[in-house]
Image: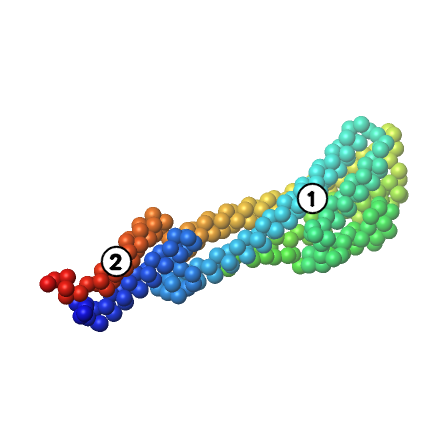
Amino acid sequence: MTRISTFSQGQALVTQMLRNQEYLRHEQTRVATGKNGDNLKDIARDANVLLSSRSVSARTESYMSANRELAVRMELQNNALGGIAGIADEFRNDLIKTVNLNSGVGLIDKMTDHMDRLVNLLNTTLNGKYIFSGSRTDVSPINVSTTADLLALANTSDAFDNNAIKLTQRLDESRSIEHGQLANEIAEPLLDGIRRIQQFANGTLPTGAGAYAPAGAFTDPLSENQINFLVNEFSVALNAIETARSAEQVNGIHMSTVQNQLELQAKELSFLDIFTAEIENVDIAEAVANLKSGESALQASLSVIARLGRLSLLDFI
């Protein structure tokens, strides 16, 4: 019994049916995964753009991670700098109060307390590394811990072991920031002021204080030369405050810069995520519609092939 359909017609129908099967499989995968393809071959037209977008995202995320760590460091630095500036304020107030009360009682004890707190703040660490030591992060930036140690030095500057290299960090591909603060730059005026009071009390005239002889322990009431010496030290205290506050302000500016950079990079990542998603991700509504269309097309193909397989000339006689 001779079939109506020819061999070539049958092959064409089978080929179309296989195409419909492949189309349906592709749409099923898209709906199941939410992606336009399993690999870059499936999105060959946009592959280069996608790879570039992923590369930029990876670099941005790397910079953001480093910048978050830097923000933590600068917050810690800010707290320490604020503490140092606070000690400088107290130092000046102690001098004023001593003169106003006309009594040296307790002044040296206060200097000792200031010294202890200052040393602790300068020895601030993050992950075991000293933050005020320049690039010598494994070395304490200050080598004295008591006023006795301080008085034993030839110069106040000898108390510092940090180097002069301020730490820097790249914020992105084109911007860097010098964020490091050095112990000697932020605290030497304050430490020198404390040392000068201690020197005078121990009977040694500090540099430039020859007019206030004789030096000696502060009394109650104060002698005229002691009052004059303490009044002269007001300017030393003001310099210590200005130095510490200036460092705190610079650090605050850098903190703002880092925060702004993080916000900008977060926006960049958000944009890149959306951009990448438009390439990789499917429109679910469209994919579902295509899936239904593919199912209908495959069903129709199979139905036609089945019907043609049953036809013969007898059906038309």
- What x and y, as percent, mark residue 173? 50, 59
Mark 2 and mark 1: span between their CA atoms? 80 Å
Q: Quadrant of residue 147?
A: top right
Residue displayed at 23% across by 64% down: 309
Crowding at label 1, few (<14), some or many (≥20) Cα neighbours within 10 Å? many
Name the foreground residue: 35 vs 166. 35
Q: Position of residue 77 (x, y in %)?
A: 66, 47
Tell me if residue 13 can be seen: yes
Q: Count residues near mark 2 (Cα–Cα under 10 Å), then give few for <14, some for 14-19, many for 20+.
A: few
- Tell me where residue 245 sits by quadrant: top right
Q: Position of residue 24 (x, y in %)?
A: 34, 58
- Say which element carries label 1: helix
Residue at 74% in and 45% down:
121
Amino acid type, residue under disc 2 in the picture: Ser
Q: Is residue 164 visible?
A: no
- Quadrant containing the N terminus is bottom left
In this rendering, is residue 233 above or below 14? above
| 277, above or below 216, in the image | below
Question: Which residue is tagged 2?
Answer: 303
